Each structure stands twice: as C-alpha cells, then as structure tokens.
Image (cartoon, grey):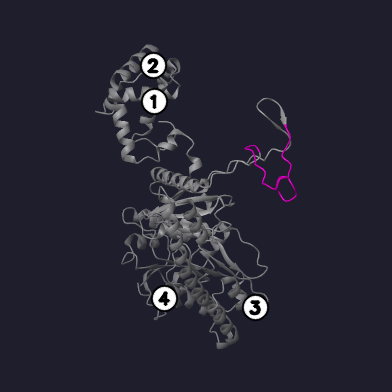
C-alpha cells in the first residue's frame, strides 16, 4: 500500500497538505499512533504516523514542529497524518517543517477516528478477509459466557486463542504493565512493553477508562492471527475492561471512606480496621500511603490506580475529604516508585501529576517473656509459680503473671496512628515535590526529606517568602549593590561554617572586610552570628527566598 492509495480512500476524508509525486509513491508498512514530542524511538521505517498534535504549543510551536518532523524523517516514516481535533486545524509551523524535511503531510478531519485509518492500512496490507477469518462462532459464544461471569482478561485471552497453537498474546497498559498474557508467554519488562504499546499493539476501546489504564492487545507475531480476529478479541476485552472499571468505582468509594477516617484527628482504631477490611486490606499490615494531585479532574486518581497496579499485594485507591487522591500499598512492595511514576505519567505528558509518599513506621520489637527464677528487689530469688497442665495453679486459680512475664504488647491504636502519620508524611512530600518540580510530573518519598533545604520545600511558598522577608529584613529591600554584597557574604560565611579566613579566600577579600560586613549583617538583622540558633535562622531564611533554587545550599 502506497501513501497515494491511503489518501485516495474517500471514506477517510484525508486532505493532502504537502507532498510531491515521488513521495506519494512511498510504501506504507504499518501505522504508529503517537503524541510524544520526540517519537523517534517508536517509529519504524515506512510507517504512517498518526498524531493528535497534543505535543504542539502556540508559544514555541515552530521549534516543537521542527523537532517532531526531524525525528520522523530520521526514523524513515512514510507520511504524517495530523489530527485537527486538538487545535482546529493543522498549524502552519508543522506544514513548513514537513516541507523542509520532505515529509508528506495530510490532515485528519476531527470526525475521523484514528482507528478507521489503522484498520484501512492493515486490511489493505493483509488483503480482504473472508468471513471465516473472524472469530469462530463457538469461540465468540464462549467469550460471551465468560463476560457474563465477569471473567478476567487472562481467561478471555486463553479462550480466544485456544484454537491457535502458535499465538502468544498480551494485554498491556501504556505504562508497560502486563494485565494478562497467554500461557507460557515470556514476561516483558515494563519499559519494553510501554514501547510496544506505542508501536505494534491494537488499542482496546473501552468507555470510562483513563488514558493511563487503557488496555492494548499485543501479539509478537501479528501475522499468526488475522487482523479482523484481533479486533474482535479487542472488542471483547473492551467490554471486560468496562466491567472492571465499574467494579473499581465501588472499590474507590470504600477507599474514600477509609481516607475520611485517616484524615480525621480522632478516628477510632476499630473503625479504621473495619475500613481497611472493607477495602480488602488486612488491618495488621504495614502500608505506604501515597497522595497525588493534578489540575485536571480525575488524572491524579487514575494515575495512582495504574501506579498501584504495578505493585505486589493488595492496594486501595480513593479520595481524601479535601479532594486529593490517595492510595495504600504494602510497605514492602518491591516497586521502584519513581520509575513506575515516570512510566505512568508519560502517557499524558501534557498533564502534570505530583505525588508524595509516606510509610508507616515498623513496629517496635516485642520483648520475649522472661522465664525461670525472678529476682526480688531484696536480691532473693523467687521460684517460678507452679502451674498445672491446664494453666492453673495447684489451688485451681489462674497464676498471676508479673510484668516481666507479660510481653510488651503494642498499644492497640499504634497502627491507626501510624497510618495517619504516614498520610501526614505523604502530604508533606507532595507539597515538597510541587515546589521543586512545578511543571514536571514527579513523585517524592518522605524519606527524601533528609536535609533542612528539603524539609523547607514542604512549607507553602507564601509562608517561606514571609519567613525570609522577616528574618533577612533590610538585606532584601531594597536590592542594591551593597545589600547584594552583604547577602553574598552571609551565604559564603555560613557555607564555610563561620570561618573568617575561608570566607575571605572564597570572596577574595581581606579578613577585616569580612568582619566589617558580618558586623553590618548582624546590626541589620538583629542576629548574632556567633550563636548557632541565629545562624540556623539566617540559613533557613536564605533557603526560603523565592528566587532560591531547590538545592540544600543557598
């Protein structure tokens, strides 16, 4: 199939924006759908590239278009098919870039589904399919019965491909999570699976499913199964995911009730334990709490849902009373949270989703009961109390256990306090990552708050700025050459642990000049730089300046 054949299909309504006659004779080997700013890793030679142009922005559109089209040219793409739904039309910057790099460009009208174009390419590539190339009726009936019983995707894949000996199939998410696979299918690492979703997988159409969780049907050998059959199986999987999404909505509601208890200052431990059980979580477990926020409605909860699905063990996702999304996962889950978060949020790079994590503290070790002779306060030995085989004394009464005999039991509400504390840690970590990575999706664990600079990032920006203005005072207003020199001296003096000589060397000043400047700083701020507490106040104020970066030194 050549580019001109695709453009000539009147049912698609594609409009040629730029190409010459020689480029229209390029052969199309397949289709890739991408909205990455740099699609080079996922485009194969000869492919038609479908893009909704989510990556393009008006303020720097020319540079973005240049980078995108150059990547397509280097990858050997056959043609770029640009959707008009996002921006209303194909930007002139993109047309110009395609002309410079000799990349055929056609517009895809808003009503045209990308799937219709994908189907057209693959149906033409493999030829017209006869009726028997679709799913056999007995297989279709079996799948319908499985759906009626709420069977999972593993059972559906096994039933769909049971009559094909060589078929290996996976259900993958955009973050590379393997939802299901046929028997004996080798495991695919998440990074590799995420790349496959953007190239060779068939999208599964399902309503009410977030872009982070959309399933894709992938076959390593697509020639082993006719395309029409693949789409039939994908349609069945779509109904399966819709059913799973409806069930998950109820789970999120139960998790929301748990979140309300964790956020309450006086929640009863028994109520929290019951809420954990309602979410399928054992109350005796130890958990990591995640809190996430995004400006776009629903994205934080959806991203958490997909990220927690990468973990091992039971989990719960819901909303806190203030609207923030939260999740509970086992504390010992062997998951690289930062790596997983990057894979999940890469599916919607235009949406910034921040998350913070806090973990329940490990329970204190329980002291074993002491056995044998007891020592009284007067130094005499007291033999242990004799008991019968039934646990009573020889007189038929229960023996009185001493404090030394009883294990040091953990207070009954320790778990509840631990979860609430982990939630507070997660909120602080969320505030920190919002301050340090304002325009980038990222996650921070509370264990990363290991310095004064990191700790201060969790304080609201307005409070940090107020503290800085209050402590540094005249050193910040007005900003003149003289006050700038004093600020530089203060930063250097504190960074060199209050050493006059090293500060003078670093600033190329005489030691007497450093003494003079430090004296002025003390008079202007009312602080004594020979006192540790005043040094800490000034150091923190420097870290809290609005124009200060995110490191641990001013």
Alpha carbons under labels 1 and 3: distance apart: 70 Å
Distance from the alpha carbon under mark 3 to that under mark 4: 38 Å
**Residue that mark 3 sits on:** 162
Residue hosting label 4: 7
Say which of marks 4 and 2 sits in front: 2
Is residue 346 visible from the viewing direction of this image?
A: no
Is label 3 in a helix, a strand or a loop?
Answer: loop
What span is in magenta?
Answer: 382-404
Q: Is residue 344 above or below residue 143?
A: above
Q: Mark 3: few, some, or many residues within 10 Å (few <14, many ≥20)? A: some
Q: Is residue 62 left or right of residue 276?
A: left
Distance in Å between CA atoms under marks 3 and 2: 82 Å
Real-space Cα distance between discs 1 and 4?
65 Å
Which SS class for mark 2?
Answer: loop
Residue behind mark 1: 491
Measuring from the top left, give residue 414's x and y in whole percent: 52, 45
Looking at the rendered image, the disc whose residue lies closer to the viewer, 1 or 4, is 1
Secondary structure of the residue carrying numbered label 1: helix
Q: Is residue 386 magenta?
A: yes
Residue 401 at least partly seen? yes
Q: Are the residues tagged 1 and 4 within 8 Å (C-beta)? A: no
Q: Earlier in the sequence, mark 4 or mark 2?
A: 4
The residue that appears at 34% across and 34% down in the rendered structure is 545
Give percent across and percent down for residue 441: 43, 51
Which residue shows up at 31% across the image and 27% down it? Answer: 472
Q: Indicate which disc residue 29 carries.
A: none
Q: Which quadrant of the rendered structure holds the C terminus?
A: top left
Q: Nearer the viewer, residue 527 or 482?
A: 527
The first of marks 3 and 2 along the sequence is 3
Residue bearing the label numbered 2 = 509
């Amino acid at each position: 199939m050549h580019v001109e054949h695709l453009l000539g299909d009147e049912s698609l309504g594609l409009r040629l924006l730029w190409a010459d006659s020689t480029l229209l004779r390029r052969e199309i080997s397949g289709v890739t759908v991408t909205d990455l700013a740099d699609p080079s890793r996922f485009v194969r030679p000869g492919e038609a590239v479908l893009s909704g142009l989510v990556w393009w922005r008006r303020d720097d559109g020319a540079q973005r278009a240049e980078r995108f089209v150059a990547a397509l040219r280097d990858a050997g793409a056959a043609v770029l098919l640009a959707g008009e739904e996002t921006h209303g039309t194909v930007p002139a910057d993109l047309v110009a870039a395609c002309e410079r790099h000799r990349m055929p460009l056609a517009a895809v009208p808003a009503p045209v589904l990308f799937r219709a174009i994908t189907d057209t390419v693959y149906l033409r590539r493999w030829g017209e399919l006869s009726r028997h190339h679709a799913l056999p009726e007995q297989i279709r009936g079996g799948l319908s019965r499985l759906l009626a019983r709420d069977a999972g995707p593993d059972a559906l894949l096994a039933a769909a491909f049971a009559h094909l000996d060589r078929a290996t199939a996976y259900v993958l998410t955009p973050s590379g999570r393997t939802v299901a696979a046929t028997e004996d299918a080798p495991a695919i690492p998440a990074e590799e699976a995420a790349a496959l979703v953007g190239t060779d997988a068939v999208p599964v159409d399902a309503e009410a499913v977030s872009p982070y969780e959309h399933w894709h049907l992938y076959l390593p050998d697509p020639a082993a199964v006719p395309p029409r059959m693949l789409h039939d199986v994908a349609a069945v999987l779509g109904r399966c995911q819709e059913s799973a999404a409806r069930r998950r909505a109820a789970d999120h509601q139960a998790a929301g009730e748990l979140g309300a208890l964790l956020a309450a200052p006086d929640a009863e431990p028994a109520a929290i334990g019951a809420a954990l059980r309602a979410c399928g979580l054992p109350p005796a477990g130890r958990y990591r709490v995640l809190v996430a926020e995004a400006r776009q409605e629903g994205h934080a909860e959806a991203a958490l849902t997909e990220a927690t699905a990468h973990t091992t063990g039971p989990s719960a996702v819901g909303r806190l009373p203030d609207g923030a999304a939260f999740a509970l996962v086992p504390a010992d889950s062997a998951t690289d949270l930062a790596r997983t978060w990057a894979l999940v949020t890469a599916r919607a790079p235009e949406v910034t989703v921040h998350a913070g994590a806090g973990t329940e503290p490990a329970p204190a070790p329980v002291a074993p009961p002491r056995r044998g002779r007891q020592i009284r306060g007067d130094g005499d030995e007291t033999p242990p109390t004799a008991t019968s085989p039934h646990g009573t004394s020889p007189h038929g009464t229960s023996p009185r256990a001493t404090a030394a005999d009883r294990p040091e039991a953990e207070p009954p509400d320790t778990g509840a306090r631990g979860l609430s504390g982990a939630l507070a840690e997660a909120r602080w970590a969320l505030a920190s990552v919002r301050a340090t990575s304002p325009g980038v999706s990222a996650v921070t664990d509370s264990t990363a708050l290991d310095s004064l600079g990191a700790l201060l990032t969790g304080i609201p920006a307005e409070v940090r700025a107020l503290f800085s203005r209050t402590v540094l005072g005249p050193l910040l207003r007005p900003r003149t050459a003289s006050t700038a020199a004093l600020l530089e001296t203060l930063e250097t003096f504190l960074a060199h642990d209050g050493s006059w000589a090293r500060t003078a060397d670093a600033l190329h000043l005489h030691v007497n000049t450093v003494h003079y400047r430090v004296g002025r700083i003390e008079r202007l701020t009312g602080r004594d730089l020979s006192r540790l507490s005043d040094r800490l106040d000034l150091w923190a104020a420097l870290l809290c300046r609005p124009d200060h970066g995110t490191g641990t030194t001013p």
